[in-house]
Image (cartoon, rainbow, N blue to C red):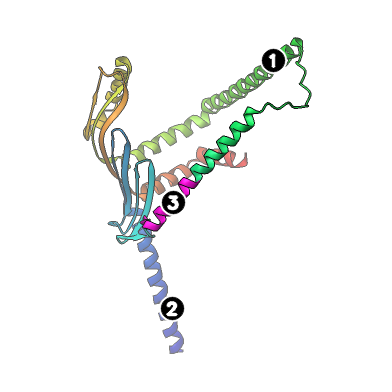
Amino acid sequence: MSVIIFILKIIGIILLVLLGILLTLLGLILFVPVRYRIGGSVEDEFEVRGHVSWMLHLLGFYFSYQESEFKTHFKICGIRIGKREKKKKKKKEDVLYEAEDVLISEEESVTEVEKEVEDTAVPTFSEEPVPEKKPRHQKKKGILDRIRTAVRRARDTLTHIKDKIYDIKNFIVDETNKKLFQILQKELRYLLKHFKFRAINTDLRFSLGDPANTGGALGILSMMPWLYRYQFHISPDFESEELYVRGVFDVRGRIRLIHVVVSAVRILMQKECRTAIKKFISK
């Protein structure tokens, strides 16, 4: 009997240890933030580098876009996963062989051109009958048919768009959906509050090619006062007639999964949201 109790104790201890490990992992996943950083420059070419890391770079995803090439790699505990691409150095013999192949291909292309010139120099007469020209009334009829088909397709497309707009309008006007939009708007503000950028450093200069458009863009940026809480420096160029954006930027932030879970639970607790999800799934 004592042996059975001892075995049960060991099993209970093991289960408690496993439960503790699972709760610890769940707590780490929910509460330890995922950090991200994106930086780069905009000059003649667009270059960007960034990474997303978790648990003090225990896990990391790195990416870069340089010279029109996008590269990614993972790191675990600072150790890169996967092999780096190594450029093989060409031997002298390979270079000589490549040069010979180029010369041979050039000689072949020259002989082909000479043959084509000889073939075109001798006139050839085909025995195939010359196709008869269609009468004018048949050509006009074909053009009219194409115009009618294009008009019919455009009319069907406009009718489809009109029906979609009508459906969206009815969806928004519905009282139940109004409350749904209010709930989603509230949760979106909650998420943006917790997902906001921790740092924004920019030094950019831009022009839209027209002083009026450049001023309009500057007016839109001035309607976002939250940007100026950061080191957000952007200056317009009203004199340039060129469309451009030049400068450097660096953005940092973090995201906690617990906020997403809390928001999702609150949304699912609302009857309107559950009804909308059921309608969407039933379609």
Tell me whether the residue at label 1 lies in contact with that at label 2, contact meaning CB atoms closer than 8 angstroms: no
**Mark 1 to mark 2 CA distance (whole Å):** 85 Å
Marked residue nearer the N-terminal end (1 or 2) = 2
Marked residue nearer the N-terminal end (1 or 3) = 3
The answer to whether 281 is drawn above or below residue 92 in the figure is: above
The answer to whether 221 is drawn above or below residue 42 in the figure is: above
Q: Give the residue drawn at x 41%, y 44%.
A: 263
Q: Nearer the viewer, residue 118 or 17?
A: 118
Crowd around label 2: few <14 · some 14–19 · many ≥20 (10 Å)? few
Is residue 173 a member of the stretch shown in magenta? no
The answer to whether 137 is drawn above or below residue 38 in the figure is: above
Give how far across and how far down residue 250 sits, in percent.
Answer: 26, 40
- Disc number at residue 98? 3
Q: What residue does disc 1 label?
A: 143
- Disc number at residue 228? none
Q: What residue does disc 2 label?
A: 11
Residue 212 visible in rendering: yes
